[in-house]
């Protein structure tokens, strides 16, 4: 009985430690330019990490000091938290599975088609109701202007592994046939009707391709890549929490048995 409680306390301590990388990854996500521009996506992972921290702390205290009431509360909260994490993971995998990316011959970067991403992402992030504010936020972030310093020559630029946002928002689509001047200045398109975005491109630093569908696709590509990285941490956390929960159920039964035995012993005496 004591061994089971001690193991549960130890495992909850590990679960508590697992909350630290979750919170750190949530802060990392929130600091990214794309997530800074989508306010409702900034903090969910941080809140999940704080929830794991509080629930694990409750389980640790309940198991270590054999507090039956705390263990009962912990088991209810942990079950809810595990279900929420599983639902979150399933939705994240389903939504983030389509990539919309395609290779560009002779280039180090990929380009992105908006139609290649899930309809849920397109409807909730790149819809006309939301895109105006997101577009202005991306323009203000100056993410494209940094490319002039990072890639001073055309060879460096064309061989660069640009992020999806840089590829979609900071340059015109390759199919348009624009002539390179610098990373954010392009002239004389050879095929101006090859794509609707060809006529939208503007060398004005406040416009560039922020009005293009390729920019919307680039934003979704960035989100997909970042959230898939965070999902790895969440999967490990869910596995640990389920393991902890199974042993915690045993500890809770032990605490109840100990309480019954103590009351029986007092009555016998």
Image (cartoon, rainbow, N blue to C red):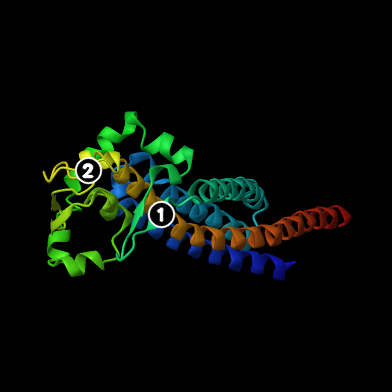
Where residue 200 sits, quadrant-wise, is top left
Q: Identify the element where label 2 is drawn.
A: loop
Q: Is residue 104 left or right of residue 176?
A: right
Q: Give neighbour class at mark 2: few <14, some 14-19, many 20+ (Cα, 10 Å).
A: some
Q: Identify the element where label 1 is drawn.
A: strand
Q: Looking at this view, name the residue that lies furthest to the front.
A: 190
Residue 209 is tagged as none
Q: Give neighbour class at mark 1: few <14, some 14-19, many 20+ (Cα, 10 Å).
A: some
Give coordinates of residue 251: x percent, y percent.
71, 60
Q: Nearer the viewer, mark 1 or mark 2?
A: 2
Q: Looking at this view, name the residue that lies furthest to the right.
A: 268
Residue 101 is tagged as 1
Looking at the rendered image, the quarter that the N terminus falls into is bottom right
Q: Is residue 152 left or right of residue 45?
A: left
Q: Is residue 102 left or right of residue 36?
A: right
What residue is shown at x 68% (from left), y 65% (from top)?
A: 5
Q: Is residue 123 above or below residue 189?
A: above
Give coordinates of residue 63: x percent, y percent.
63, 60
Identify the residue under disc 2: 192
Give coordinates of residue 147: x percent, y percent.
17, 60
Is label 1 in contact with label 2 (beta carbons under 8 Å)? no
Q: Earlier in the sequence, mark 1 or mark 2?
A: 1
- Closer-to-camera residue (125/258): 125
What residue is shown at x 66% (from left), y 62% (from top)?
A: 243
Q: CA distance from mark 1 to mark 2?
A: 22 Å
Give coordinates of residue 116: x percent, y percent.
44, 46
Q: Is residue 12 above or below residue 39?
A: below
Where residue 206 sits, quadrant-wise, is top left
Q: Is residue 88 left or right of residue 22?
A: right
- Closer-to-camera residue (240/169): 169
Looking at the rendered image, the quarter that the C terminus falls into is bottom right
């Amino acid at each position: 009985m004591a061994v089971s409680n001690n193991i549960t306390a130890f495992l909850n301590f590990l679960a508590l430690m697992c909350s630290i990388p979750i919170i750190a990854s949530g802060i990392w996500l929130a600091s990214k330019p794309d997530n800074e521009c989508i306010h409702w996506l900034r903090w969910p992972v941080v809140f999940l990490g704080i929830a794991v921290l509080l629930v694990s702390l409750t389980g640790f205290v309940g198991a270590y000091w054999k507090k039956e009431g705390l263990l009962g509360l912990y088991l209810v909260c942990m079950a809810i938290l595990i279900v929420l994490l599983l639902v979150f993971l399933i939705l994240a995998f389903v939504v983030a599975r389509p990539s919309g990316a395609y290779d560009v011959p002779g280039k180090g970067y990929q380009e992105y088609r908006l139609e290649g991403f899930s309809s849920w992402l397109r409807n909730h992030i790149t819809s006309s109701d939301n895109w105006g504010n997101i577009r202005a936020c991306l323009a203000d972030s100056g993410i494209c202007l940094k490319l002039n310093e990072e890639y001073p020559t055309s060879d460096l630029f064309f061989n660069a592994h640009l992020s999806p946002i840089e590829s979609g928002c900071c340059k015109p689509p390759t199919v348009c046939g624009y002539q390179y001047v610098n990373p954010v200045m392009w002239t004389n398109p050879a095929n101006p009707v090859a794509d609707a975005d060809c006529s939208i491109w503007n060398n004005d630093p406040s416009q560039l391709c922020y009005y293009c569908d390729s920019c919307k696709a680039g934003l979704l590509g960035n989100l997909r890549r970042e959230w898939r990285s965070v999902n790895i941490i969440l999967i490990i956390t869910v596995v640990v929490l389920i393991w902890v929960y199974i042993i915690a159920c045993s500890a809770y039964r032990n605490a109840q048995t100990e309480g019954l035995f103590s009351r029986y012993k007092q009555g016998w005496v």
